[in-house]
Image (tube, rainbow, N blue to C red):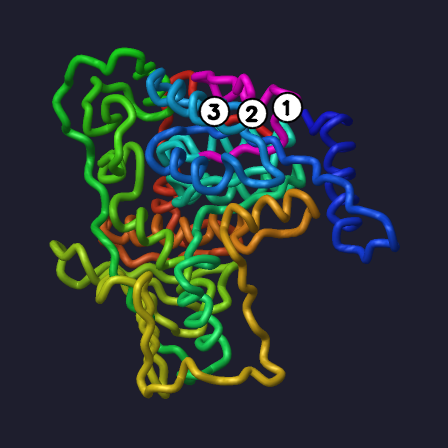
């Protein structure tokens, strides 16, 4: 099912409104009020709540019209926050399908655990809703391939939540720009310092949180008993440790790796491609040292200081959220006369909302996010299987046939991937 004529008409109006707003006004005429983008928020854990509070509620040109979470306490808290500011009777539901079926929802922000992302992304694309989805965008290599195809087929505006491209004082933009401009010469190696691969979940069972639909929280993941570590009780203020377990996420390697590997991909101008070889560490017990090799010989290594460190023939650039430096000094201070400059944005959600209005492409669109997630998946495969492999980033396949069984996982009955 494609977007309804009503939605398509509204998109046309949004684009036209954006064009009119940018045009010079005739003498004595005032700009028409901006029609708001109506957003449904799916997933109201700490990340979804923070994004909603900081970037949606109370912001000009946007209304939150629906919230969704499988925990009653979290969704009612979100509804209260929205209603207090917007003066609406915001819809609160535990089913993302209800959000996507609504005519008063133009776009969705998805901040659920990673194992739900692809299912909700595809459903949103089929419903014709524009999408902002948190990183890591997918749980598997196969999912990365599918979300690109779904978003492209249905023409949705898609932003991945890899906000280092737009925020943190533009440090990452400056680093990527300098690397791409050859300020440190040919890049030989990039070291990315992030956490470990995930492990299988072995947590003991506990009495479920009242008001939580635990079966729905699990979704496509294997059936198991509730544990508060996976879905903390009530409205909490920390990032839960479901990120550490293979059933639901890619571990610390993917959680921050989706940010820092994303910057490596950007700086290497590989947003639409990826590495061609997977090399596990020589020590079979090591949890650092896995390496991905690109076609031009650049080596991307898991391990090193936090952030991304680019080592070139003529110098080094190191960048993290709170720092940026270079050797020699001055590499980052330059005037790019005639050089391509990377875009600067004032905020990641703001960039997405503007693109929803004018139907342009956000700074971290679906393929960018999917291929950065694929880096994390390839690194994890290096640790899980300890085999050197050849990867075809265009075909999304390994040369070694046995390894193609590792590009996806078996989902729980009733939760197969939706078609599009």
Contact? badges 3 and 2 (CB < 8 Å) = no
Q: Classify mark 1: helix, strand or loop.
A: loop
Measured along the vertical axis of the image, is residue 72 above or below residue 242? above
* Circle nearer the N terminus (1, 3): 3
In this figure, which residue is indicated by the disc labeled 3?
84
Measured along the vertical axis of the image, is residue 316 above or below residue 69? below
In this figure, which residue is indicated by the disc labeled 2?
65
- Residue 97 in magenta stretch: yes
Q: Quadrant of the N terminus?
A: top right
Going by the picture, which residue comes out furthest to the right?
27
Measure the alpha-carbon separation of dots 1 and 2. 7 Å
Q: Residue 226 is drawn in which quadrant?
A: top left
| Residue 234, horizontal then vertical, whole percent | 27, 22
Measure the alpha-carbon separation of dots 3 and 2. 13 Å
Residue drawn 67% across and 41% down? 155
| Residue 354, horizontal then vertical, whole percent | 63, 48
Residue 416 circle label: none
Give the label, 1 or 3, closer to the camera: 3
Contact? badges 1 and 2 (CB < 8 Å) = yes
Residue drawn 30% across and 64% down? 322
* Circle nearer the N terminus (1, 2): 2
Other-residue count near label 3 (Cα within 10 Å), few / some / many at <14 / 14–19 / ≥20? few
* Circle nearer the N terminus (3, 2): 2
| Residue 411, horizontal then vertical, whole percent | 37, 26
Other-residue count near label 1 (Cα within 10 Å), few / some / many at <14 / 14–19 / ≥20? some
Which segment did they paint magenta? 87-110
Task: Name the foreground residue: 14 vs 327.
Answer: 14
């Amino acid at each position: 099912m494609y977007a309804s004529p009503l939605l398509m008409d509204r998109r046309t109006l949004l684009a036209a409104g954006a064009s009119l707003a940018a045009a010079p006004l005739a003498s004595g005429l005032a700009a028409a009020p901006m029609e708001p983008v109506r957003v449904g928020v799916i997933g109201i854990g700490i990340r979804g709540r923070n994004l909603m509070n900081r970037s949606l509620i109370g912001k000009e040109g946007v209304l939150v019209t629906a919230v969704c979470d499988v925990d009653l306490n979290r969704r009612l808290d979100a509804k209260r926050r929205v209603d207090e500011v917007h003066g609406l009777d915001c819809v609160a539901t535990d089913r993302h399908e209800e959000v996507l079926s609504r005519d008063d929802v133009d776009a969705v922000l998805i901040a659920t655990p990673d194992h739900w992302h692809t299912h909700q992304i595809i459903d949103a694309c089929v419903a014709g809703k524009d999408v902002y989805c948190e990183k890591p965008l997918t749980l598997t290599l196969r999912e990365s391939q599918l979300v690109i195809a779904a978003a492209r087929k249905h023409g949705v505006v898609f932003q991945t939540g890899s906000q280092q491209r737009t925020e943190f004082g533009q440090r990452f933009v400056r680093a990527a720009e300098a690397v791409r401009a050859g300020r440190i010469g040919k890049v030989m190696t990039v070291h990315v310092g992030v956490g470990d691969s995930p492990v299988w979940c072995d947590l003991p069972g506990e009495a479920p949180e009242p008001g939580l639909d635990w079966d729905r929280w699990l979704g496509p993941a294997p059936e198991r008993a509730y544990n508060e570590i996976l879905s903390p009780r009530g409205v909490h203020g920390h990032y839960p440790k479901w990120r550490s377990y293979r059933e639901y996420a890619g571990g610390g390697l993917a959680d921050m790796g989706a940010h820092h590997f994303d910057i490596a991909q950007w700086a290497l101008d590989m947003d639409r491609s990826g590495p061609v070889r997977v090399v596990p560490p020589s020590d079979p017990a090591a949890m650092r040292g896995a390496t991905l090799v690109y076609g031009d010989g650049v080596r991307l290594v898991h391990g090193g200081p936090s952030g991304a460190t680019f080592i070139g023939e003529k110098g080094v650039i190191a960048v993290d959220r709170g720092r940026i430096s270079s050797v020699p000094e001055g590499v980052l201070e330059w005037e790019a006369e005639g050089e391509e400059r990377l875009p600067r944005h004032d905020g990641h959600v703001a960039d997405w909302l503007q693109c929803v209005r004018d139907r342009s492409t956000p700074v971290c669109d679906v393929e960018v996010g999917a291929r950065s997630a694929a880096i994390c998946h390839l690194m994890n495969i290096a640790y899980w299987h300890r085999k050197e492999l050849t990867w075809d980033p265009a075909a999304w396949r390994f040369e070694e046939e046995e390894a193609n069984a590792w590009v996806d996982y078996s989902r729980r009955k009733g939760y197969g991937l939706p078609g599009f």
